[in-house]
Image (tube, rainbow, N blue to C red):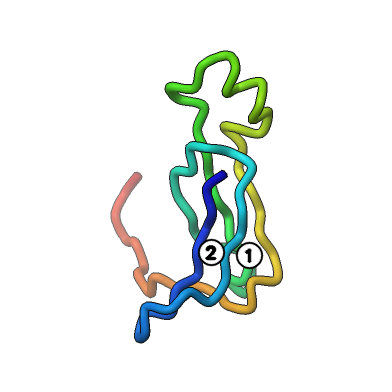
Amino acid sequence: MPQVLHIDPKTGKLIHAVEMPALNMTSVTFAGPNLDILYATSSQKDLNKEQLAAQPLAGAVFQIKNTGTRGHSAGINYRGSV
């Protein structure tokens, strides 16, 4: 199964790896009041029936807590219209 990796940006060394229960992981982002919860998204796209049966959580969003790190605010105040 795939993993979400925490890699030291200065040294390139692996700090931590979290195994994920879905083959097609698509993205990660930090969220929460302290930006200390990591969310990882996955997809069911291109999985056949056997793969879907083996990965019932494919297509889910996963919440990963206690990573020991946190994200940074984008620092952008959007002033346009939606």
Q: Amino acid at mark 2?
A: Phe
Q: Compare residues 74 and 80 and report the one nearer the observer.
A: 74
Residue at the spot x=58%, y=38% of the render?
Answer: 22
Query: What x and y, as percent, mark residue 44?
Result: 52, 27
Residue beneath disc 2:
30
Q: Residue furthest bottom?
A: 10
Relative horizontal placement of residue 52, taking residue 24 as reference (left or right)? right
Q: What's the residue at 61%, 48% (across, down)?
A: 20
User: How many marks can you see?
Assistant: 2
In percent of width and height, residue 29 lies at: 49, 59
**Most distant residue in the top direction:** 49
Amino acid type at image mark 1: Ile
Q: Is residue 60 above or below residue 28?
A: above
Q: Is residue 74 left or right of residue 56?
A: left
**Where's the N terminus, which quadrant?**
top right
Q: Where does label 1 land, which residue?
A: 37
